[in-house]
Amino acid sequence: MIGFGVLTGIESPRMEANASTPWIGVWERIGIGAQMLWVIVLAIVLLRRENEPASVKVR
């Protein structure tokens, strides 16, 4: 995610100068997709952890 954010940031001055930036949209979409994938994986892990039976404490 950080890498694609850096790539987007590198091309952003060209956008301000109204120059051609054909790859900036690709970098943004890949970065957003990676973030969404991370949230989905985290949610699945947390849901599976919630459904596991609690361990019994022995005294």
Image (cartoon, rainbow, N blue to C red):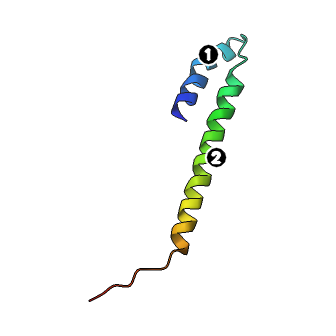
Q: Which residue is mark 2?
A: 36
Q: Which mark is residue 13?
A: 1
- Which residue is more in the foreground, 10 or 52? 52
Secondary structure category for the residue under label 2? helix
Quarter that holds the N terminus: top right
Placement of 46 over or under 18, stated as above or below: below
Q: As shown in the figure, which amino acid type bears the numbered disc 1?
A: Pro
Placement of 34 over or under 55, stated as above or below: above
Q: As shown in the figure, which amino acid type bears the numbered disc 2?
A: Met
- Which residue is more in the foreground, 45 or 13? 45
Q: How many marks?
A: 2
Quarter that holds the C terminus: bottom left
Q: Position of residue 27 (x, y in %)?
A: 65, 27
The residue at 62%/53% (across/down) is: 40
Placement of 52 over or under 43, stated as above or below: below
Q: CA distance from mark 2 to mark 1?
A: 26 Å
The residue at 51%/74% (across/down) is: 52
Query: Pointer 1: residues within 10 angstroms few (<14), some, or many (20+)?
Result: few
Secondary structure category for the residue under label 1? helix
Q: Position of residue 7 (x, y in %)?
A: 58, 23
The residue at 58%/29% (across/down) is: 4
The residue at 57%/30% (across/down) is: 5
Left or right: residue 12 versus residue 6 is right
Q: Position of residue 28 (x, y in %)?
A: 66, 31
The first of marks 2 and 1 along the sequence is: 1
Left or right: residue 54 versus residue 17 is left
